[in-house]
């Protein structure tokens, strides 16, 4: 008798899937592939991947360039790669005093994990 | 009194984690980063990602070039990208008659998903 139930239920998972369904669900559209490929590409470089895991596993879940010195590249190169990870939406950053601190964006990690979920829980 | 229990227990998860721990667990070594970056890089191209999702979501979990025609690139380009995905260990292939059929390697998807697991289930 009333129309109060027209709002769709929001599924909790939707919040962590900003772009795309699991890769095994259906063929991606060109737009979905653009967004998702950007994230994969950002992690598709060994140095960037080491830096990303250094930030992600650092105490408190954040790190500045000053915390990362053992990947065998110069500090400007570290900064360059951290910026690329930020541009891809994988890290967020905040300047505090002299240093810029980087932090992993957990919702993006979850969304990427969701892309790699295989169908029907297999 | 005996040494019969020296064999370590095999954890089921170990089978699907050929290279690396979750990215949030500890900084990756150079070797781990090389292996994992190769997989991410393979999916870091929009056309390859569309082809991968086309194969992964195709009926029966496999597809040949003949099944994939709607990503807007030529058949030789499709073949080229499918080969790259295979070289990265993301697809396996089998020739049957005229066509090569590609299939997603589920253990690799799981291993990549594991990389993106956030620490402590968050």
Image (spheres, coloured by chain):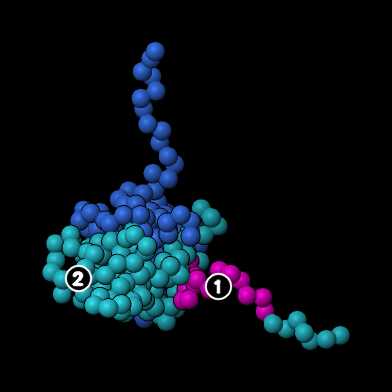
Chain colours: A blue, B cyan
Q: Mark 1 lies on which chain?
A: B
From the viewer's side, name the closer residue of B104 and B9.
B104
Residue A110 shows in the view: yes
Residue displayed at 22% across by 70% down: B65
Q: In this view, does B38 lie to the left or right of A35?
A: right
Q: Distance between the residues labelled 2 and 1?
A: 33 Å
Using the rendered view, name the quadrant where residue A72 is placed.
bottom left
Q: Where is residue A29 in the image (x, y as percent from the top left)?
A: 23, 54
Residue underneath mark 2: B78
Q: Where is residue B87 in the image (x, y as percent from the top left)?
A: 31, 79
Q: Give SS at disc 1.
A: helix
Residue displayed at 50% across by 62% down: A59
Q: Quadrant of the N terminus of chain B?
A: bottom right
From the viewer's side, name the closer residue of A119 and A73.
A119
Q: Does the magenta stretch include residue B17?
A: yes
Using the rendered view, name the quadrant where residue A32 is placed.
bottom left
Residue underneath mark 1: B14
Which range of residues does the magenta coloring cover?
A: B8-22
Q: Where is residue B32 in the image (x, y as percent from the top left)?
A: 43, 78
Residue displayed at 20% across by 56% down: A30
Q: Which chain carries label 2?
A: B
């Amino acid at each position: 008798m009333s129309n109060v139930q027209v709002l769709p239920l929001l599924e909790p998972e939707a919040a962590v899937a900003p772009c795309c369904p699991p890769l095994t669900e259906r063929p991606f559209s060109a737009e979905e592939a653009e967004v998702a490929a950007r994230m994969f590409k950002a992690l598709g470089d060994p140095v960037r991947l080491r830096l990303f895991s250094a930030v992600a596993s650092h105490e408190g879940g954040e790190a500045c360039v000053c915390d990362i010195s053992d990947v065998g590249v110069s500090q400007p190169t570290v900064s360059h790669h951290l910026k690329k990870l930020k541009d891809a939406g994988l890290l967020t950053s905040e300047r505090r005093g002299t240093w810029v601190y980087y932090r992993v964006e957990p919702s993006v990690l979850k969304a990427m994990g969701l892309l790699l979920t295989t169908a029907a829980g297999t």
